[in-house]
Every structure is written in C-alpha cells, then in structure tokens.
Amino acid sequence: MKLIPNFISFSRIILSLILIFVKPLSIIFYVIYLICGFSDIMDGFIARSTGTASVLGAKIDSAADMAMVGVLLIVLYPIINPDRKIVIWIITIAIIRFAAMAIAIKKYKTFASIHTYGNKITGIVLFMVPILLHYIFAIELMYIICAMASLSAIEELVIQIVSSELQVNKKSIFAK
C-alpha cells in the first residue's frame, strides 16, 4: 500500500512522456492528459489518507509535475507559437525556479519544491492550458500564465532564501 502513491506519480512521468508521441489536442492526447491530471490529484490524496506520505513521494510528485510541464512546453510550443517576449519570460521563470531549487539543495542538502498556494494555483491553470486554448487566444493565455508563474516562482525563491529550515508545505510567504 505504501508504494501505490509513488507508483501513481511515476506513472504520470511515463504518461507525460508518451504525450510527446501523440498528436497534440487530439482525443488520445486529452485522454492521456486527463489521466495525468487525475493521477496528480490522486497520488497526494492516497498518500495523505493512508498515512503513506513520504519525502521520496513528494520528490517523485514534483519530478512528475516538472516532466508534465516540460512535455507541455515541447508539445504546445508549435501550436501556441509564442513571441520572443514570452519565450524570454518563460526562461526567466525557469531560472528563478532553478535558483530556488539550488538554494534548497545547498541549504538543506535535498531537492525541494514548496507546495504553496501560488504553486498549486499556477499548476491548475497550467493544467488547463490545452483545454483553454479552444476558448482564449494563446498569447493572452500565455501572459496570464506567465504572470501567475512569475509570482509563484518569486514567492518560492523568497521562502527558500529567508527560511532557516525546509518547509515544503508552507502555504504562502505570508503564512506562519
């Protein structure tokens, strides 16, 4: 029972990679994509409800989230065709995120991604991108997502800088 949440998270990594080989925004794409989204909800829920949450599980979940975002960037880039400003903005967000991770590795000797409300909201909106592309112009959608991702990345970086101990479940920079 202890390994089920980790297996679910790991399966999200595999399914995300499969999306690279599926026609973007097709029925098969959406089926696999929705399974990935459902697995992201279920792994943490099962881990918490069965008392099997672990540091390794949180790391696998974060790796699965990063794999999914990376695959989405690869798959949706030609469809969205972002201008240079958006590309630079995305690279800047990635640099901020990697800086926060590097600080965590240096300070706490472990990979860590904080589960803030900002990160969760950004994750939900990122997950909605393939669906929202049918209703919102891609450029407007990219500006909204980049603004949200910037705020959550900066918040995580600040938390990592000012914290004296690792707090992966810190909800906000404003929360105690």
Image (cartoon, rainbow, N blue to C red):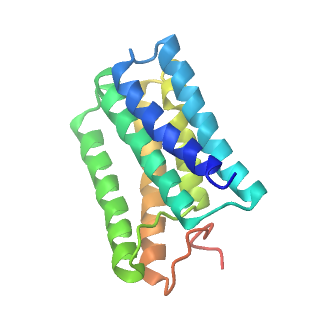
User: Does the rendering let one see residue 135?
Assistant: no
Q: Residue at x 65, y 61 (%)?
A: 53
Residue extending farthest top: 27
Q: Look at the image and tell me in which quarter the C terminus lies.
A: bottom right
Residue 146 drawn at (x, y percent): 41, 46
User: Does the rendering let one see residue 114?
Assistant: yes
Q: Quadrant of residue 73?
A: top left
Residue 122 drawn at (x, y percent): 53, 48
Q: Nearer the viewer, residue 31 or 137?
A: 31
Q: Is residue 39 left or right of residue 82?
A: right
Q: Is residue 51 left or right of residue 83?
A: right
Q: Nearer the viewer, residue 165 or 161?
A: 165
Residue 162 drawn at (x, y percent): 46, 83
Q: Residue at x 63, y 66 (%)?
A: 171
Residue 152 drawn at (x, y percent): 49, 58
Q: Residue at x 36, y 74 (%)?
A: 105
Q: Nearer the viewer, residue 50 or 22?
A: 50
